[in-house]
Each structure stands twice: as C-alpha cells, then as structure tokens.
Amino acid sequence: MTQQTTGTGDRRSTGRRIGGPAAGVTRPLLAFGVIAGPVYVVVSVAQALTREGFDLTRHAWSMLANGDLGWIQIANLVVTGLATVACAAGLRRALTGGTGATWLPRLVAAYGMSLIGAGIFPADPGLGFPAGTPEGPGPMSWHGTLHFVVAAVGFVCVTVACLIAGSRFAAEGRGGWALYSRITGVVFLVTFLGIAAGRGATWSIMAFITGLVGLWAWLAALSIHLRGRVSPGHA
C-alpha cells in the first residue's frame, strides 16, 4: 500500500488511503471518535439539569455517579471509554509511519481506559450532592482516590496525544491543524489542573467543562479528518 504525499516535496499525509476490506473496518472504528464526545456530553448535561441537588457551577460531572441514578453516569463513562478505545484502534489503522503513528493511538486508548476506570471507581459525593450530602468536600474514599488517579493518568495521556498530533501536523506543513491540536492539549491540561486545585470553585468547574468539550471536539474533528482518507466506496 503506497503512502500519499500532500502539497509539495516529501511531506507526509496524516493518514493513508485505505480501500477494500481494511476500509470497512477503519471507517466504523473512527466513527466512534466522532460520536463518543457528543454522547458523553449530552448524557452528562441532561443529568446535570435534572438530578436533584446537582449544580453545574459547583459539581463536577463525575459526581453524577453517586445516588440512586448514579448508574447512568457510570454507564456513560464506561460506554464512552469503550468508544474511545475503538477510535484509538481506528487511528492506529489510519495513521502511517511517522511522528505519532504508534504513540498517538496508544495514548488515546489509555484515555479511553481511564474513562472506564473512572466509571468502575466512582467519585465521592460531596458539596451537597447527592441531595442530603453535607456541604464541603467530604472525606476521600479508596474508590474516590482511584477515580482521581485513573482520571489524572488519562488526562495526561490525552494531553500528550494532542501535542504529538500537533508535532505530526507541523511536520506535514499543516500549520492550522498543528496549532489547533497543541492549543487543545494545553488548554485541557490547564483546566484539569485548575479543577484539581479549585476544590469546587465555580471558575474551575466551568473552565474544565470548556476544556473537556474542546477536547472531545478535537477528537471528533481528527476522526472525521482521517475518515476522509479512507475510500468511502469501501466503507
């Protein structure tokens, strides 16, 4: 299978043209990267607006895993994580040799696994949620500690994935994509550090939501971009 160049010179393309049976697998896998974020965001926001005692300006979405309806957010995290891992498999098939061809998919897969882990180990209740919970952060349980640890590992991995994607795009002469990827990674990491330090402060919660939505938008855009490199006639 030959590698296609872009522009002039020997710049490498971000993805490879895939046809035949391979395309019939790669395109559906990349489609998971398009839908994973919207599903996670819509399900989380729907709960945030309807669950008694939940305040979008005070409570992190992960806290929705508590209470009688906590299973909804747990399932949301696990399903989104599985979709992200599937997307990573698509990235591995779509990317050719070059910067990030190996590690970008691995890091995205690690992020997906961290979402699954965050669902298995739910965050602790606190700050008055679920309804009836005392105000204040409350004590941290073993599963709450593991939730934070696996989430932190996943967030670092996906941040590095964004930066690697930026380097790959830069090497190909795609300055806009390179800048977009790098900004997404940096903004997301900064907002994560902010929510870790903010302890429920409104500014940190809202900033993290912005960074998280931006991250999912980037993964969807990348998946759509790479799907375009796969021959539609064989998808």
Image (cartoon, rainbow, N blue to C red):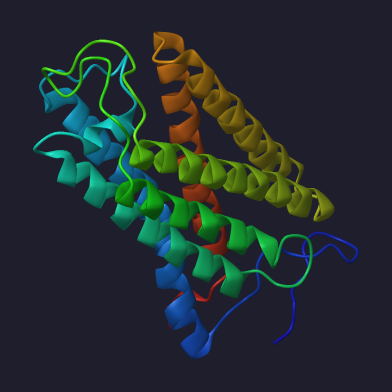
The residue located at (41%, 54%) in the rendering is 34
> Residue 107: x percent and y percent?
60, 56
Against 148, is 199 above or below?
A: above
The residue located at (57%, 62%) in the rendering is 226
> In screen coordinates, is 180 left or right of 58?
right
Looking at the image, can residue 228 be seen? no
Q: Using the image as rendered, state which of residue 98 and residue 7 is in the foreground.
A: 98
> Residue 24: x percent and y percent?
43, 81
State the quadrant of the C terminus: bottom left
State the quadrant of the N terminus: bottom right
Looking at the image, can residue 135 be seen? yes
> Residue 175: x percent and y percent?
76, 42
Which quarter of the figure has residue 5? bottom right
Against 180, is 220 above or below?
A: below
Direction right: furthest residue: 9
The residue located at (53%, 47%) in the rendering is 154
Image mark count:
0
The residue located at (48%, 46%) in the rendering is 150
> Residue 105: x percent and y percent?
60, 63
Q: Using the image as rendered, state which of residue 154 and residue 185 is in the foreground.
A: 154
Against 111, is 61 above or below?
A: above
Which quarter of the figure has residue 63? top left
Q: Using the image as rendered, state which of residue 124 and residue 29 is in the foreground.
A: 124
Q: Using the image as rendered, state which of residue 172 and residue 67 is in the foreground.
A: 67
> In screen coordinates, is 109 left or right of 6?
left
